Image (spheres, rainbow, N blue to C red):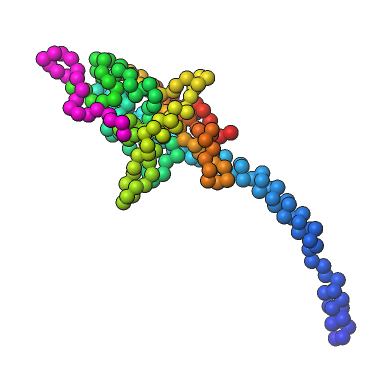
Amino acid sequence: MERMLGKKLSQMRNAEGFTLVELMVVVAIIGILATLAVPQYKKFQAKSRQSEARLSLGGAYTIEQSFAAENASYTTCLGQAGYNRDGVRFYYSVGFAGPALNQQTCGPNNTLDCNFTAWQFDPATQTYAVQGDAKCDEQAQNMGIFMATAGENGQLVPKDADTARARLDKVTVDGGNAVTAISQQTFTIGASGSILTAAGTVALTNAFDGWTIDQNKQLKNSQSGLF
């Protein structure tokens, strides 16, 4: 018995734990792995957010085609035409921006303001006119720009119109030409969002991800924010 106890005590004395140097090496390896993994994880996360742009633009395309079937023209007024987005937080602004909001080439006779939701035919003059008071005002939602957060009672509240336009203006193609456009027979709707973040919270202002869709349902990632 004494011999066995002595042997066990000897084994315990000879047993060694991790040294401080070994622990520091392990910590350093974990730090290196984290440095390599975190950026890749953020890109994977940002890539998953791009599905929002594709789905949102697909919905906008459907609304435009349905509207044109009834009014013989496209319109910038996505909101009043029936477009909506379910959710509480959106990473992308969707709609038209810049000169597209002021073009006068919509309507069934190709002479009316694009910022109206519908037009009616006047038999007396044989011309089309704006229907009622359906003009798109300067509210972000009525311009077709949706970048909302939850307000009171969970309702969606449009962000500031100028902020939403600025985001959409960052969507560029072909060396920087403006991307959104609208006319009686054509449209190009943009989606822009800052989906890649630094330190998990701070948006990278130059990392705006840009998407477009046109009347032919051509969906393009015109400006990648994943860099």
Q: Residue at x 34, y 44 (%)?
A: 156
Q: Residue at x 44, y 23 (%)?
A: 179
Q: Nearer the viewer, residue 30 or 175?
A: 175
Q: Is residue 102 above or below residue 198?
A: above
> Would residue 213 appear left or right of 111 to someone viewing this image?
right
> Where's residue 41, x and y in %?
59, 44
Q: Residue at x 72, y 55 (%)?
A: 27
Q: Residue furthest top?
A: 125
Q: Is residue 66 above or below residue 125?
A: below
Quadrant in which residue 2 is drawn:
bottom right
> Where's residue 201, x and y in %?
53, 46
> Would residue 132 appear left or right of 187 to someone viewing this image?
left
Q: Nearer the viewer, residue 64 or 79?
A: 79
On the question of residue 57 being in view, the answer is: no
The residue stretch that appears in magenta? 121-139
Q: Residue furthest right?
A: 3
Q: Nearer the viewer, residue 224 or 165?
A: 165
Secondary structure that dominates the magenta span = loop
Please identify the quadrant where the N terminus is shown: bottom right
Quadrant in which residue 178 is drawn:
top left
Q: Residue at x 47, y 20 (%)?
A: 177
Please identify the quadrant where the C terminus is shown: top right
> Where's residue 64, x and y in %?
32, 27
> Where's residue 62, x and y in %?
34, 30
> Would residue 7 appear left or right of 29 to someone viewing this image?
right
On the question of residue 136 being in view, the answer is: yes
Q: Residue furthest bottom?
A: 1
Magenta stretch: residue 56 in it? Answer: no
Q: Is residue 186 above or below residue 141?
A: above
